[in-house]
């Protein structure tokens, strides 16, 4: 039997149901939405948790002329009275603002017009509606041509649909906050928030053509800044129990997917890498990750888990976090990466400028955008925050590693100090520089084998030493009866009057730093690493044994006569 296809990147509900894709049934979102009875509902969820597909599902359920068979066999079809009353009963305006951006406000404004104009053209039957006056038909044509009053465009479109059908309108606005994010990054936030506020207030506030509206986004922008006076707004965030299972995959749903595709043996690894989020009272997986992971497993059953979520955004939020971190915050980041938790009071409704006004606001943003999740709340109203899973942990490590590397590269004076000390045989200066450097860094060592920890420090040293283009750096090269960690020699032959060999050790006991540094130094001699140079041995070879414990190190050195 041919299996259903995995819905890689499919966000259109009709495609999902008619083109042979596996669909995880979230249609009871419709039931809960209608039973709640709110006029306007805002859902905030991290990216890639199914917001756009759910919005498409809502459109196909409510819109006049829909193919009702799309919902056959799904959970919502069991709600017979509800379906009889609502399915296919309303005109629908459905737009996504995820592509509305520009380097300048005028560009973004045109992008917003284009989005609304495209939706108007989808509803082009209004051009010839005999229920609209000639003036109203002309007003509609202006919407299609992206002309007129942008601030009033959605309200006008809803009024025209209402008059044509004699039925109130369902309005769906996906990724409402993306234009604000882009505007803040590019310096026209005040203009954009004024425009978005005017559009939303016009269409959602005192609009007698409105049946109900649903908005989605990543951040809950404060009501005072964008939803002023909108008293009929119901906000559902990732801490709310209502609707908690309708965005993201539950554990039961993931088990069913793995079973369907014959991948049950990969359950524990799937859980370790892609589970861990808590929305309300429900533990959920990121759907984007699970679907992509299953696709990889179907073609390469022995593949290692991949970081899929990282490729959907720049993840610059973590870099901003690292840049703003003081010593206490850096220690908390380290604790998170090591699998521990931190307690923080969160503010779930911010404006974009407020994110940078207070250093602690970044915790709220990391939480609402999916880099952190919660495990409950203490008696002081603080959330217990953790990194959800191994995938997100790997993003933290990668981004902080790059941030640390870039920070070091900018410190040219410090690097010159290190390079002069390494070439000059000054172990105390090397030790002081490395200790100073690490004290200002963020540690993210794996809790596994010592070799893994040594590899981190090894890589750090390689990155520092490679900034000197006059040196040739070799790593883990065969030498004598083993492999030398780091070998340094001048690039130009006429300058080859020295060679440097560095051996790196890690200890889990700070009291052993001195001993481990000495062991590293003795290993260079006992394993005859100097033989790497062959007959082209330099006049002098400097040996360094460097031992690390967390953010501390010891350096031992000896000079050896060469040729």
Image (spheres, helix red, strand yellow):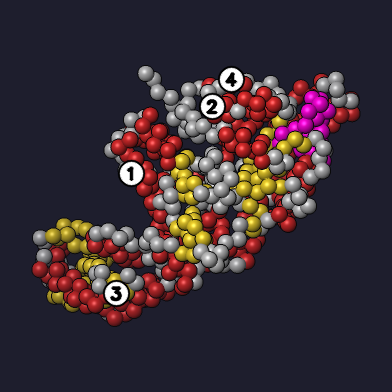
Q: Quadrant of residue 134?
A: top right
Residue 543 position (above or below residue 395)? below
User: Residue shown at 20%/73% (left/top)?
Assistant: 516
User: Is residue 157 within the magenta segment?
Assistant: yes
Q: Distance between the residues labelled 1 and 4?
A: 37 Å
- Identify the residue under disc 2: 74
User: Residue shown at 70%/42% (left/top)?
Assistant: 38
The earlier-in-sequence mark between 3 and 2 is 2
Q: Kindly tell me whether residue 364 is visible in this rendering.
A: yes
- Identify the residue under disc 3: 553
In the picture, which quadrant includes the N terminus? top left
What stretch of residues is rendered in magenta? 149-171
Mark 1 vs mark 3: give the one in front. 1
- 208 and 111: which one is in front? 208
- Identify the residue under disc 1: 268
CB-based contact (under 8 Å), mark 4 and mark 3: no
Identify the secondary structure beneath mark 1.
helix
Q: Distance between the residues labelled 1 and 3?
A: 37 Å
């Amino acid at each position: 039997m041919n299996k259903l296809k995995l819905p890689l990147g499919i966000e259109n509900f009709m495609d999902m149901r008619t083109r042979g894709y596996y669909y995880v049934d979230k249609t009871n979102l419709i039931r809960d939405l209608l039973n709640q009875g709110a006029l306007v509902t805002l859902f905030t969820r991290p990216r890639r948790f199914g917001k756009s597909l759910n919005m498409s599902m809502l459109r196909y359920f409510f819109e006049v002329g829909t193919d009702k068979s799309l919902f056959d066999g799904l959970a919502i079809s069991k709600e017979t009275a509800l379906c009889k009353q609502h399915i296919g009963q309303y005109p629908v305006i459905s737009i996504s603002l995820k592509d509305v951006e520009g380097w300048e406000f005028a560009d973004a404004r045109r992008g917003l017009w284009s989005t609304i104009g495209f939706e108007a053209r989808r509803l082009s039957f209004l051009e010839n509606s005999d229920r609209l006056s000639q003036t109203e038909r002309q007003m509609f044509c202006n919407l299609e041509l992206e002309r007129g009053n942008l601030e009033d465009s959605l309200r006008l479109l809803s009024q025209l649909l209402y008059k044509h059908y004699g039925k109130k309108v369902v309005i769906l606005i996906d990724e409402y906050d993306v234009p604000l994010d882009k505007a803040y990054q590019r310096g026209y936030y005040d203009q954009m928030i004024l425009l978005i506020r005017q559009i939303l207030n016009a269409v959602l506030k005192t609009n007698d053509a409105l049946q109900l509206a649903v908005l989605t986004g990543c951040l809950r922008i404060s009501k005072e800044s964008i939803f002023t006076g909108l008293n009929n707004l119901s906000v559902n965030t990732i801490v709310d129990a209502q609707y908690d299972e309708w965005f993201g995959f539950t554990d039961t749903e993931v088990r069913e997917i793995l079973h369907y595709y014959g991948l049950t043996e990969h359950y524990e690894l799937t859980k370790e890498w892609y589970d861990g989020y808590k929305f309300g009272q429900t533990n959920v997986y990121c759907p984007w990750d699970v679907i992509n992971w299953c696709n990889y497993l179907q073609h390469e059953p022995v593949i290692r888990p991949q970081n899929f979520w990282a490729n959907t955004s720049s993840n610059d939020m973590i870099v901003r976090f690292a840049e703003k971190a003081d010593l206490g915050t850096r220690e908390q980041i380290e604790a998170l990466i090591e699998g521990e938790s931190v307690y923080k009071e969160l503010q779930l409704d911010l404006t974009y400028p407020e994110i940078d006004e207070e250093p602690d606001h970044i915790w709220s943003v990391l939480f609402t955008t999916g880099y952190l999740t919660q495990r409950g709340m203490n008696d002081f109203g603080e959330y217990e925050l953790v990194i959800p899973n191994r995938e997100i942990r790997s993003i933290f490590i990668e981004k902080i590693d790059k941030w640390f590397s870039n920070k070091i590269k900018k410190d040219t004076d410090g690097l010159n100090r290190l390079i002069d000390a390494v070439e000059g045989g000054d172990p105390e200066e090397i030790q002081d520089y490395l200790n100073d450097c690490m004290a200002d860094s963020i540690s993210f060592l794996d809790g596994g084998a010592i070799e893994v920890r040594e590899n981190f420090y090894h890589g750090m040293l390689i990155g520092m030493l490679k900034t000197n283009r006059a040196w040739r750096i070799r790593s883990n090269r065969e030498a004598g009866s083993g492999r030398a960690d780091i070998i340094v020699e001048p690039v130009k032959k006429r300058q080859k009057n020295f060679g440097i060999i560095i051996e790196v050790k890690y200890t889990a006991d700070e009291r052993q730093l001195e001993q481990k540094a000495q062991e590293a130094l003795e290993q260079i001699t006992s394993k005859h690493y100097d033989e790497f140079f062959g007959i082209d041995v330099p006049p002098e070879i400097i040996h360094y044994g460097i031992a690390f414990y967390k953010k501390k190190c010891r350096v031992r050195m000896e000079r050896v006569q060469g040729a």
